[in-house]
Image: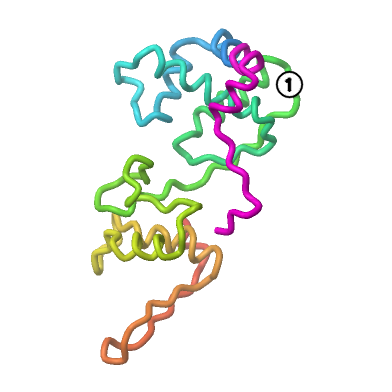
Amino acid sequence: MNLDRVEFLWSSDEINGRAHEYWPLVMDIARRNTLPRIIRCSQIMGRSEQDELTAAQIFYPCMQCADIFFLKADICQLGMDQRKVNVLAREYCDDIKRKNKPIILSHHMLPGLQQGQEKMSKSDPSSSIFMEDEEAEVNLKIKKAYCPPKIVEGNPCLEYIKYIIFPWFGKFVVVRTAENGGDSYMTFSASMLT
């Protein structure tokens, strides 16, 4: 990815620079919701509703919800695991009588590249492909990825092909030597995404 025209913003810088706007918004979201409603959002931290949560963990969904409004995002694109906070943001619009609700674009959660990883992990860089990864780094991560032959279930490489390669390119080529049967071509069909 060419980063020449990309500017990364640190949330902490934005929040600290406009704390007088951010924290009242977080508190307003918190005061308009019940504890059970906020606890239902706990999956955004990889927790279940039954887990014992600290006060900070309970407060986190209010902060993430506030981020949507604080950043003035008209379109909010997050993974399916963030869906409950997205719904919380839209419900908050009802509470404050705001007509323009954020548009929520939820995407499929890609698994981590290692065996048994339900989703990519920021804490394990080898399990994730990041936007700023160089091509050589992406190639190395894919070469080391869990991809057992003839196993579809739980195979992260096939998930990447299904949700990234096919929608963008419409086909996938497995490059093989002539003695291994030559190249194999697969083409995309919409039924593959169901």
- 70 and 47: which is toward the camera: 70
Q: Is residue 35 above or below residue 189?
A: above
Hey, which residue is sitting farthest right in the picture? 99
Left or right of 62 in this view: 51 = left
Hey, which residue is sitting farthest bottom in the picture? 178
Q: Is residue 101 above or below residue 112?
A: above
Amino acid type of disc 1?
Answer: Arg
Determine the image quadrant of residue 3. Answer: bottom right
Q: Which residue position holds label 1?
A: 98
Q: Name the residue rendered at 49%, 53% in the picture.
A: 132
Q: Name the residue rendered at 26%, 91% in the picture.
A: 179
Q: Name the residue rendered at 45%, 55% in the picture.
A: 133
The local secondary structure at tag 1 comes to: loop
Left or right of 185 in this view: 168 = right
Residue 51 lies in magenta, yes or no? no
Left or right of 39 in this view: 176 = left
Q: Quadrant of the N terminus?
A: bottom right
Instruction: Using a 10 Å C-alpha cutoff, classify the residue at mark 1 as few (fewer than 14 neighbours), some (14 to 19) or many (20 or more).
Output: few
- 149 and 24: which is toward the camera: 24
Q: Is residue 88 above or below residue 112?
A: above
Query: Range of the magenta residues?
Result: 1-24
